[in-house]
């Protein structure tokens, strides 16, 4: 079987050396070239035709975002971003995902060599996944540095969801490709939609920026979840990076639980944790949504949600960047429906409208 050909693009000679070493230790991949900046990278990619490139976010001569934007317009290919654990690094990385990067790795600010070596398994897993992922073309040119986030769209007339919005909760699980897929779903929901709870596989330091970006785009409010806060209609709650999110009942209200703990299915936050609480606490008033992602996190708990009376949707293969998590959920018998990404939001709204007159245990 042919090895995955990788080109490493980074202005740091140390990082280029470390990533090359990690890649070349794998039996199924090879670092075929390195580049210190985008201009060298352009020629290296043209000459070596790699399967995947790793790309530093911040580089001299040409910003990583500018290079990525040009690459995804002219020669779309799988890209794994190498980011930094800073607020600017998080903002730039999220823009890179919008432009079509498959995933990212966050390199540490201190202890760089040891930190990258500790990330070896994560880096190589993401390269393997990127080699098989569906490529999305660029979403347009990168914004200028410091450019403000888009303004919140004008609110449309509320949809008549009535009391249903206080009874139901939508639970979303996502991983690779999920930052954009979740954005597409949330921006399609009306402002009076029921509460939404989201677990997106993302490390600490990135979910704050991601929640702010979503909040500026969606008609519902979006924030990082805080432990013990009431879960309200018209709001979406994102699991903070590195912590598990779940839901509990407090009298007549639902509240968010944000807890540390061991990784579940190798993930923290884990979709399994969120969906298990949905099955146990919310039951037939839950709606489940499994979006694009690598692996099987949440599949068993999504089946438990369906067994408890929840209505579940999985994103279809054709619209996924990586079909792993939806495929596993479907294989477990967890899905009521399988839909393309561009139909999911409107389908959920119509589902709620059409069942507004039903008793909750029939939905």
Image (cartoon, helix red, strand yellow):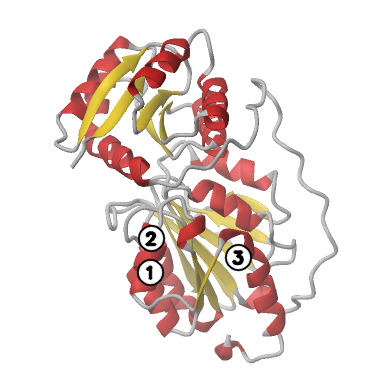
Q: Which mark is residue 325?
A: 2
Res 19 visible: no
The quarter of the displayed image where residue 140 is located: top right
The quarter of the displayed image where residue 325 is located: bottom left
Residue positioned 56% across, 35% down in the render: 99
Q: Position of residue 146 (x, y in %)?
A: 66, 22
**From the viewer's perspective, is residue 110 above or below residue 265?**
above
Regarding mark 1 in the picture, which secondary structure is present there?
helix
Label whose residue precedes the other's in the sequence (1 or 3): 1
Does the residue at mark 2 contact the one at mark 3 (Cβ under 8 Å)? no
Q: CA distance from mark 2 to mark 3?
A: 16 Å
Number of numbered discs present?
3
From the viewer's side, name the closer residue of 271 and 57: 57
Regarding mark 2 in the picture, which secondary structure is present there?
helix
- Taking the image as shown, residue 60 lies to the left or right of residue 268, namely right
- Taking the image as shown, residue 291 lies to the left or right of residue 236, namely left
Residue positioned 37% across, 78% down in the render: 333
Residue labelled with disc 3:
344
From the viewer's side, name the closer residue of 109 and 328: 328
Q: CA distance from mark 1 to mark 3?
A: 16 Å
Q: Residue furthest top?
A: 61
From the viewer's side, name the closer residue of 202 and 59: 59
Q: CA distance from mark 2 to mark 1?
A: 6 Å
Does the residue at mark 2 contact the one at mark 1 (Cβ under 8 Å)? yes
Does the residue at mark 1 contact the one at mark 3 (Cβ under 8 Å)? no
Residue labelled with disc 1:
329
Res 69 visible: yes
Quick one: label 3, few (<14), some, or many (20+) residues within 10 Å? Answer: many
Quadrant of the image for the C terminus?
Answer: bottom right
Q: Position of residue 307 (x, y in %)?
A: 41, 84
């Amino acid at each position: 079987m042919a090895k995955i050909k990788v080109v490493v693009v980074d202005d740091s000679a140390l990082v280029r050396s470390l990533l090359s070493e990690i890649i070349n230790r794998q039996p199924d991949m090879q670092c075929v070239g390195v580049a210190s900046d985008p201009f060298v990278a352009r020629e290296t990619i043209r000459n070596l035709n790699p399967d995947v490139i790793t790309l530093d976010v911040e580089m001299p001569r040409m910003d990583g975002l500018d290079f990525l934007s040009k690459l995804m317009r002219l020669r779309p290919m799988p890209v794994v971003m190498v980011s930094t654990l800073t607020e600017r690094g998080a903002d730039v990385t999220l823009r890179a995902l919008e432009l079509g990067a498959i995933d990212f790795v966050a390199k540490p600010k201190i202890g760089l060599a040891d930190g990258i070596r500790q990330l070896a398994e994560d880096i190589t897993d993401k390269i393997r996944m990127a080699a098989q992922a569906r490529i999305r073309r660029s979403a347009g040119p990168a914004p200028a540095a410091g450019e403000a986030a888009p303004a919140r769209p004008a609110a449309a007339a509320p949809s008549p969801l009535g009391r249903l919005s206080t009874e139901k909760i939508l639970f979303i699980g996502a991983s690779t490709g999920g930052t954009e897929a979740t954005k597409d779903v949330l921006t399609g929901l009306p402002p009076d939609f029921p509460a939404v709870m989201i677990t997106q596989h993302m490390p600490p330091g990135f979910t704050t920026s991601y929640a702010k970006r979503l909040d500026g785009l969606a008609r519902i409010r979006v924030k990082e979840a805080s432990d013990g806060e009431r879960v309200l209609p018209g709001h979406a709650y994102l699991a903070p990076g590195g912590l598990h999110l779940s839901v509990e009942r407090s009298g007549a209200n639902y509240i968010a639980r944000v807890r540390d703990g061991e990784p579940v299915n190798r993930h923290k936050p884990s979709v399994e944790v969120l969906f298990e609480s949905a099955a146990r606490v919310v039951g037939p008033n839950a709606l489940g949504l499994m979006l694009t992602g690598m692996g099987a996190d949440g599949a068993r708990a999504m089946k438990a949600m369906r067994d408890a009376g929840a209505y579940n949707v999985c994103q279809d293969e054709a619209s996924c960047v990586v079909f792993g998590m939806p495929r596993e959920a479907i294989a477990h018998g967890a899905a009521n429906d399988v839909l393309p990404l561009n139909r999911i939001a409107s389908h959920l709204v119509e589902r709620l409208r059409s069942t507004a007159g039903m008793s909750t245990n029939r939905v």
